[in-house]
Each structure stands twice: as structure tokens, then as C-alpha cells.
Image (cartoon, grey):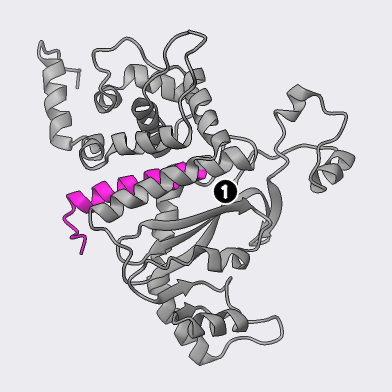
């Protein structure tokens, strides 16, 4: 079938797009980006213009661009192209009539300024406030888990690798080489394979599948060491779920004494397996605990299984922004699917 030529092709395509729906429309409707930008400006004030120069782009525009980048998993150059080419992006950013579009370097500089200022937690917390203000409280318990986030593998000589393990950089590395080396990421082994990078630890509420608390570490940190840090005291339920990576007699005892209802799966040992009763208990925990896998699956679709940046500072900011962007996307889903906040 040959393509049909029409004088009204653009309008016909626009009508079809309207029927399919633009997911960014809901994001613009339900999210207060002005409040998010205000929180960022308070934590990381915009650069002074005392020496002149071109005025910076508004913070609200730039944070919306960073959210787009996380939602669609775009590198800086690819994002710049999409901003020039993609009509839905321009509508979302209110730039349809503008010829001034931030380029890849501007996006990188803005993101890096926020990363160095350590405002990722401010962004994440402001999104939490918006969730709460719209009635989406943490309810029905929480699920704690962690996911590996791969980083670019470093090819170092043996002597260099030993120096990096000690937390320093080899003296022979020149400044341009130091800028291209990640000395914060670590190796770990999982399911018989070696992985290099970081870990995203998260607490997810059971009802809405929203991320409530996060922590970012290098990959070699054991999941169990950050468990207590992730507990969300604001959850209306005292139920806490976790997989086999978290069991500890001391932990369960202290949690129960603090009023928590513990649902942590049991783990067997090389010389002794688990009983049939424990297997049934694990199976009962598996279904509610699996809801956290839905969240990590969504993050993986957004590129949350790897990072393009180097170092724990930049990685922490990107993953905090990724988690906040997931929450915003999930908020729109909950709103438009009619899931009541209470």
C-alpha cells in the first residue's frame, strides 16, 4: 500500500496523537514544578550575573528537562536533539514558539552544578511532599530491597587497581585521565557473575508502589547494612517485608521490640536447608514482597540499571533524580487510573 498524500496530513496526525494521549500532559497537570524549582534555588542558588554574560535558563525549565531525560533515558546529546525535534517535549516545556533551546553542554553543566551542591535529596524530598499533599500517604506496610546499578568498567593496571582500592588515585594519572576514572564504584558478585558499579537501596510502600526512602552505595556494600536506615517511620502500617538477603536474629528481635511486624524471608545454609514451615512462610511473603520488583522493573525501563556518569557524587544525584522522576510518573498513573489517595 502506497502512502496516502493529504493536504491535511499534519492535522490528521495531530488528531491521532490527541486520541492516543500525551503522557506529559498529566505530568504538567499534576506536578508543581515551580515548587520543585524553588526548592532547588534555595538549596543551590543560581550563579551570580555580576560579571555579565548570558542569563541562565529558568530553573523550572531545566528541572523539567532533567525529568524528561530520566523518564526517557536519554544521553545529553540525544536529549538536545529530541528537544529540537519532538513536539510533545516542546509543548511540555512551553517552548513551541521559542528558538532558544538548551544544548547538551548547558544541560550537563546544570545537572553537574546540582550534583556537586548535593541537592538530590532536596529534589526527592520535595517530590515526597507533593505526594503527601495530594493524599498519597505511605500505607499498608513497606518493602525494602536493593538493585545493582552498573557503571562503566574501569580498565586499570594491577598496581593502579590496588591504589584505587585504598581510596586514592595513582600519582601517575594526569588530570584529564583522573576525570575519566571512577574510583568510587566497586566490584561485587551476584548469581555467579561479577558486577561493577553501585547499589540503589529503596523502601517502597506496599499500597501505591511509591519509593519513600532511598540510599545509594557502591556495589560491594551488603544490602543488610543499610536496612534500618531505609525504614519509613511515616508508613501507617508496621509491616515490613524483605527477601532472603536481610534475615538476622538480632535485627528481627530489635524490630519486634520497636513494634514492627517482621516479614523477612528465611535463608538456608550450605549444611542446613529451611524447614517446610519456613518454605510456606517464604511463599506467603513472596507475593506482597514482589511489588518492589515492579518498581525496580519500571526503573530499569527508565535506564535505572546503569549510569553514564562517574563518581559517587554524580551517581547519587542521578539516582535520586531517577527515583523522584519515577514517583512523578507513578503519581500521574495513580491519578489518571482513579486510585483514591486514601
Going 68% across and 45% down the picture, which residue do you hit?
185
Is residue 68 depicted above or below 330 in this figure?
above
Total marks in image: 1
Q: Residue at x 51, y 91 (%)?
A: 276
Give 313 or 264, whichever is nearer the viewer: 313
Q: Which residues are magenta?
A: 319-342
| Percent coordinates x, y for residue 271 in the rendering | 71, 85
Q: Based on the displayed image, in which of its 4 quarters is residue 268 positioned?
A: bottom right
Residue at (11%, 13%) from the top-left corner? 6
Left or right: 140 with respect to 337? Answer: right
Q: Is residue 301 visible?
A: no
Instruction: Point out the image quarter for the N terminus.
Output: top left
Q: Main secondary structure of the magenta part?
A: helix
Q: Nearer the viewer, residue 47 or 172?
A: 47
Name the side, left or right, on which 241 lies relative to 26: right
The secondary structure type at the circle numbered 1 is: strand
Relative image position of residue 191 (x, y in whole percent): 63, 62
Q: According to the image, label 1 marks what residue?
A: 149
Q: Nearer the viewer, residue 99 or 81?
A: 99
- The verdict on residue 107 being magenta is no
Rendered-image quadrant of the C terminus: bottom left
Q: Is residue 75 left or right of residue 183?
A: left
Which residue lies at the image location 16% right of the left edge and 17% below the top edge? Answer: 10
Amino acid at each position: 500500500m502506497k502512502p496516502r498524500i493529504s493536504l491535511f496530513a499534519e492535522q490528521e496526525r495531530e488528531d491521532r496523537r490527541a486520541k492516543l494521549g500525551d503522557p506529559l500532559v498529566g505530568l504538567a497537570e499534576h506536578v508543581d514544578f515551580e515548587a520543585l524549582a524553588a526548592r532547588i534555588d534555595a538549596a543551590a542558588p543560581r550563579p551570580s550575573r555580576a560579571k555579565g554574560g548570558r542569563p541562565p535558563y529558568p530553573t523550572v525549565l531545566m528541572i523539567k528537562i532533567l525529568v524528561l531525560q530520566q523518564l526517557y533515558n536519554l544521553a545529553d546529546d540525544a536529549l538536545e536533539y529530541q528537544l529540537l525535534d519532538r513536539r510533545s517535549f516542546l509543548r511540555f516545556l512551553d517552548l513551541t514558539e521559542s528558538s532558544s533551546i538548551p544544548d547538551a553542554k548547558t544541560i550537563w553543566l546544570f545537572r553537574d552544578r546540582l550534583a556537586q551542591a548535593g541537592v538530590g535529596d532536596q529534589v526527592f524530598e520535595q517530590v515526597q511532599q507533593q505526594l503527601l499533599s495530594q493524599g498519597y500517604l505511605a500505607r499498608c506496610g513497606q518493602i525494602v530491597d536493593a538493585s545493582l546499578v552498573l557503571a562503566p568498567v574501569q580498565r586499570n593496571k594491577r598496581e593502579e587497581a590496588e591504589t584505587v582500592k585504598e581510596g586514592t588515585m595513582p600519582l601517575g594519572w594526569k588530570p584529564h585521565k583522573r576525570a575519566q576514572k571512577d574510583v568510587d564504584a566497586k566490584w561485587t558478585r551476584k548469581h555467579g557473575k561479577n558486577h561493577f558499579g553501585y547499589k540503589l537501596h529503596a523502601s517502597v510502600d506496599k499500597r501505591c508502589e511509591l519509593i519513600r526512602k532511598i540510599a545509594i552505595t557502591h556495589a560491594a556494600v551488603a544490602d543488610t547494612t543499610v536496612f534500618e536506615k531505609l525504614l519509613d517511620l511515616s508508613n501507617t502500617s508496621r509491616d515490613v517485608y524483605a527477601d532472603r538477603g536481610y534475615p538476622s536474629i538480632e535485627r528481627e528481635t530489635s524490630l519486634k521490640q520497636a513494634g514492627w511486624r517482621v516479614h523477612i524471608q528465611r535463608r538456608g545454609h550450605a549444611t542446613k536447608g529451611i524447614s517446610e514451615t519456613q518454605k510456606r512462610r517464604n511463599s506467603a511473603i513472596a507475593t506482597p514482597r514482589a511489588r518492589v520488583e515492579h518498581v525496580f522493573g519500571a526503573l530499569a525501563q527508565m535506564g535505572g540499571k546503569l549510569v553514564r556518569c562517574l563518581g559517587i557524587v554524580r551517581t547519587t544525584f542521578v539516582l535520586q533524580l531517577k527515583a523522584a522522576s519515577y514517583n512523578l510518573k507513578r503519581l500521574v498513573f495513580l491519578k489518571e487510573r482513579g486510585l483514591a489517595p486514601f
